[in-house]
Amino acid sequence: MDWDPNGKPRKPDFLGIGAQKAGTTWLSQMLGQHPGLWTPPFKEVQFFNHRFVEEHRKWLPWHFKRARQNIEKRYEARGEDVPAPVVKYLDRVMREPMFTNHWYKTVFAPAPEGRKTIDITPEYSTLPEEGVDFIAKFLPEARFIYIIRHPVDRAISQLKMNLTRARRKPASVEDWLTEVQDPVLVDRGDYRTYVPRWNARFGADRMLYLPFGRIARDPLGLLRQVETFLGLPAHDYRDTGRKVFASDNSLVVPDKARAALRAKLEPQFAFLEETFGRAFTSQFR
């Protein structure tokens, strides 16, 4: 087990900040294989958004309960017991007081000496101004990765995930038109609001933007770019083409609802093309 049970609390070196439904789980699974990088056993530490986005706090107990269950299931699937150091670690990070500065550093304590650490939590991209200010002061040397997906595709993927979790299926076009008006679909992909916040505080030496479509078309090339940005040597990754969290194919969004989303998100397209250029936006899908 690649784990230092006597490791000291420490801050992460890198953050994957978003966007939701834009390949952050795939990125976490790939970087978790790199021998120079240590990732927590659960994705999405949720520290900064707990501190600065009050409405997120109501579902975070569920998030950590599910994270622990998933870890236990992974060991069970291999016919193994969860190692004692991992149990001790989970007991520590999943009990009060959570979400303090010291707690956050404890999350990364098991990283072996000489390894870099990363926290991939897509909710961080939605932080308010004061949240990004706090990160700039709290993590003065950290680097950040932000994957940007086609705004409509991203919103639809999020909508399908939300409907699946709620066990709800729209029965008519009118129902779908109601669903796509949910403001949360715009919020998580509001690049026009969020990107300038990060760019105002971090330059290109610390902020890497990637188009989502490269995960499917050129996964190894994308990972090489990430390695270079993070200062890591090249690694031979497994299963780079494996898709994670595929959408429910039984949920087919009618063209009329998709068009309504497109109209609603049109300002995002204009902003992204102006900010990143056509070569970047052509790789959104």
Image: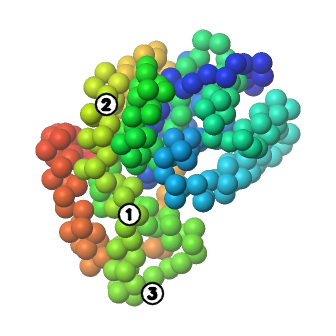
Frontmost of labels 2 and 1 is 2
Residue 58 percent location from the top left of the image: 60, 59
User: Which type of secondary structure does the marked residue at label 3 adopt?
Assistant: loop
**Residue type of the residue flagged with mark 3:** Ala
Q: Can the viewer see residue 126 in this picture?
A: yes
Where's residue 151, x and y in %? 29, 56
Q: Residue at x 38, y 19 (%)?
A: 228
Q: Residue at x 31, y 28 (%)?
A: 202
Rendered residue at 50%/23% (across/down): 13
Residue 171's disc is: 3
| Circle nearer the N terminus (3, 2) | 3
What residue would you read off at disc 1? 185
The residue that disc 2 covers is 201
Rendering coords of residue 100 (x, y %): 63, 37
**SS at mark 1 in the image:** helix
Left or right for 166, reference 66:
left
Q: Amino acid at mark 2?
A: Arg
Give the mark nearest the N terminus, 3 or 1: 3
